[in-house]
Image (spheres, rainbow, N blue to C red):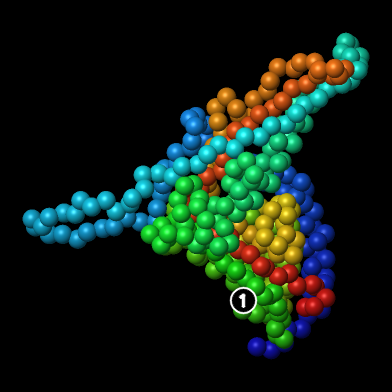
């Protein structure tokens, strides 16, 4: 392949990405609670009761038997589990209102409904913390995030009362890809093998398992990874356009995310908080490849952002209440989820 020459440099294209695309991503996702909101909109929130959460299982496939005529049919149970079991994890947020503030916000001159504002802010704080916990492992009080549901080592640990290390439970193990080397560009300006895009493609394919319903329908990227992704897209677009294939540019724009954050038709959600809630932190950027059909967020009836009555704080000139939440994130089929770690991000100056 001949070296591509262009009047437009990579840095010019990347500057366009930074100016016109990244601000929109930041406004949309960086300061929001994307996975929290997506689970709510996807209908993945389940209100339940009981001491435990009984989780119906959806395994990859069952055993089949061919027969003809009057042959005896097998009646042996092929799936030893009727369901998994998860436990509740409870959280609370204290809410304080100084009585001087309350008095200042009463009567015709009040500037705000202080107590309602305080409660709204507390609920928002609780939702933000829950969204962060979605990316973590098992907390001290038993909340199990994605690092427990789809860990970087799928062959160890017990999840939802099922031991993944047991070979007979291999169907309960998630997919996992470890990309240990940074992706680079070759002398012809094209992306080398074992790159970010190839790793993303492999991860999406691993989750599909030849089952349309199991195909990934959501990618969760940390802030560091989306920078490398858009950088790759920008350079690929420039390379294809300057090689005389303008039609491909439109295809890449729609498919890889130069205009909107998509990859192969799958929406990309960006959340900077992923960096600090997985192995390696900022030095180990990565992503989750998910199928929201198999993720459920259970909330306990009666403890679903429940608020206690306001009362005076003992020996303090203030009002006090609490908001309570009992919850758990559960996965009904880890095999159709993937965790992708160790993605390197090259600097534009190195291209």
Looking at the picture, how far across and down is residue 22, in whole percent? 77, 57
Q: Helix, strand, or loop for circle 1? A: loop
Quarter of the figure with the N terminus: bottom right
- Left or right of 256? Residue 21 is right
Outermost residue toward the top? 107
Outermost residue toward the front? 315
> In this view of the protein, can residue 334 be seen by the observer?
yes
Front residue of this view, candidates 7 and 110: 110
Which quarter of the picture shows residue 114? Answer: top right
Looking at the picture, how far across and down is residue 150, in whole percent? 55, 56
Number of residue marks: 1
Report the residue at 50% width, 52% height from top: 158
Quarter of the figure with the C terminus: bottom right
> In this view of the protein, can residue 110 be seen by the observer?
no
Looking at the picture, how far across and down is residue 173, in whole percent? 47, 58
Report the residue at 75% width, 50% height from top: 30
Which quarter of the picture shows residue 320? Answer: top right
Front residue of this view, candidates 135 and 90: 90
For the residue carrying disc 1, how many other residues have a C-alpha within 10 Å: few (<14), some (14-19), or many (20+)? some
- Left or right of 123? Residue 336 is left
Looking at the picture, how far across and down is residue 319, in whole percent? 81, 19
- Left or right of 79? Residue 73 is left
Report the residue at 75% width, 28% height from top: 94
Which quarter of the picture shows residue 212? Answer: bottom left
Outermost residue toward the bottom? 2
Q: Is residue 322 above or below residue 259?
A: above
Front residue of this view, candidates 299 and 5: 299
Q: Which residue is mark 1?
A: 194
């Amino acid at each position: 392949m001949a070296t591509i020459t262009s009047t437009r440099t990579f840095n010019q294209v990347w500057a366009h990405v930074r100016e016109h695309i990244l601000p929109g991503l930041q406004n949309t996702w960086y300061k929001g609670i994307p996975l929290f909101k997506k689970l709510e909109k996807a209908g993945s929130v389940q209100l339940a009761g009981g001491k435990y959460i009984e989780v119906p299982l959806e395994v990859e496939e069952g055993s089949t038997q061919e027969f003809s005529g009057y042959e005896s049919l097998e009646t042996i149970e092929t799936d030893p589990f009727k369901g998994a079991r998860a436990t509740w994890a409870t959280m609370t947020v204290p809410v304080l209102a100084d009585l001087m503030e309350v008095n200042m916000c009463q009567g015709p001159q009040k500037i705000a409904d202080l107590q309602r504002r305080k409660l709204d802010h507390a609920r928002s704080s609780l939702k933000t913390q829950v969204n962060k916990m979605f990316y973590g492992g098992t907390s001290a009080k038993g909340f199990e995030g994605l690092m427990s549901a789809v860990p970087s080592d799928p062959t160890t640990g017990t999840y939802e009362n099922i031991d993944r290390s047991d070979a007979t439970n291999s169907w309960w193990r998630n997919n996992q890809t470890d990309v240990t080397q940074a992706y680079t560009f070759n002398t012809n300006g094209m992306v080398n093998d074992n790159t970010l895009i190839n790793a993303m493609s492999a991860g999406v394919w691993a989750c599909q398992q030849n089952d349309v319903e199991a195909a990934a329908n959501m990618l969760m990227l940390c802030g560091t990874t989306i920078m490398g992704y858009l950088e790759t897209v920008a350079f690929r677009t420039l390379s294809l356009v300057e090689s005389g294939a303008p039609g491909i540019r439109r295809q890449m724009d729609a498919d890889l995310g130069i205009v909107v954050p998509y990859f192969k038709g799958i929406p990309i959600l960006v959340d900077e908080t992923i960096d600090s809630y997985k192995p390696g932190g900022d030095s180990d950027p990565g992503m989750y490849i998910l199928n929201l059909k198999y993720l459920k967020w259970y909330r306990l009836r009666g403890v679903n952002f429940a608020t206690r009555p306001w009362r005076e704080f003992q020996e303090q000139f203030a009002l006090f209440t609490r908001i309570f939440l009992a919850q758990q994130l559960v996965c009904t089929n880890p095999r159709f989820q993937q965790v992708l770690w160790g993605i390197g991000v090259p600097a534009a100056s190195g291209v």
